[in-house]
Amino acid sequence: MKILNIAAGKFEPLPMGENIMFPKFIVNVDTSYFSKRDPGLVEQGIMEWEKDPDAITTQEYINMDVFEFMERTRIRFEQASIYRFLEHVSFTQVEYFIYLVSTCLEKGANVDVIVPNYTLLAAMILNENMYSSRNFNAHNILLTTELLNEPSCPHASIWTPERMKYFWEMEGRFKVVSQDPKFSFDGRDIYLRSIIERI
């Protein structure tokens, strides 16, 4: 199974379905990696790996902009993971990003997306009372980082379960299969996890 791990930094793809036991070739693409691995050599390595009956799980780390990688790669993946990155994609580029993901996947492939759930975050703002809360500073840090992040790497698009379904299904390339609107990830339970099928 070939997996594209999009801009996930140190996060590995979470297990999904019955494919847990199969060997995997995971291509991690992120500009934060030290590795200067040539994407062309990775493509060649995948072709050799697919022919090997004794193939074991393999990972490659490519230091490259994920848009550029998806625009240029010839690999068709059977799964993609996008953890805490989609919210950094500018709302003007969301549709193009989703299109690029579609061009890198085989039909029937799954996309695993984790983003801050703005429905939960909005409710937290509406229900907050800074004067009666003992942990207001922790609450404020969580809310501010998940809504805005850092000025050098801001959040640039808003995600709710309804928006996820709307944008991913807009062009008929994907179908949202399941959603967990209060998914716990990296110590916080304010995330939306969506499993989306390439159709």
Image: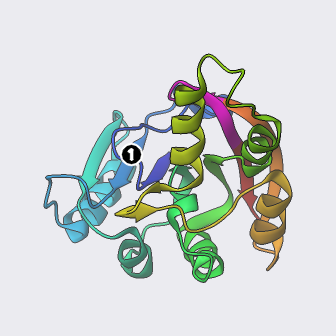
| Residue 185 forms part of the magenta stretch | yes
In the rendered image, residue 37, in percent from the top left (x then y), is placed at 16, 60
User: Which quadrant holds residue 23?
Assistant: top left
User: Which quadrant holds residue 62?
Assistant: bottom left
In the rendered image, residue 197, in percent from the top left (x then y), is placed at 74, 56
In the rendered image, residue 144, in percent from the top left (x then y), is placed at 55, 46
Horizontally, residue 184 falls left or right of residue 125, namely left
Q: Amino acid at mark 1?
A: Phe
Between 112 and 32, the residue placed more toward the observer is 32
Horizontally, residue 50 falls left or right of residue 137, namely left
Predominant secondary structure, magenta span:
strand
> Which residue is outermost to the top?
134
Establish if 122 lies above or below 172: above
Which residue is tagged 1?
25
Q: Residues within 10 Å of mark 1 (few under 14, many from 20)?
A: many
Name the residue located 53 percent from the left edge and 61 percent from the top edge. Answer: 155
Name the residue located 51 percent from the left edge and 32 percent from the top edge. Answer: 22
> Which residue is outermost to the front?
131
Q: Is residue 43 visible?
A: yes
The region drawn magenta spans 184-192
Q: Is residue 185 visible?
A: no
Quick one: SS at disc 1? strand
Q: How is the image coloured?
A: rainbow
Establish if 162 lies above or below 102: above
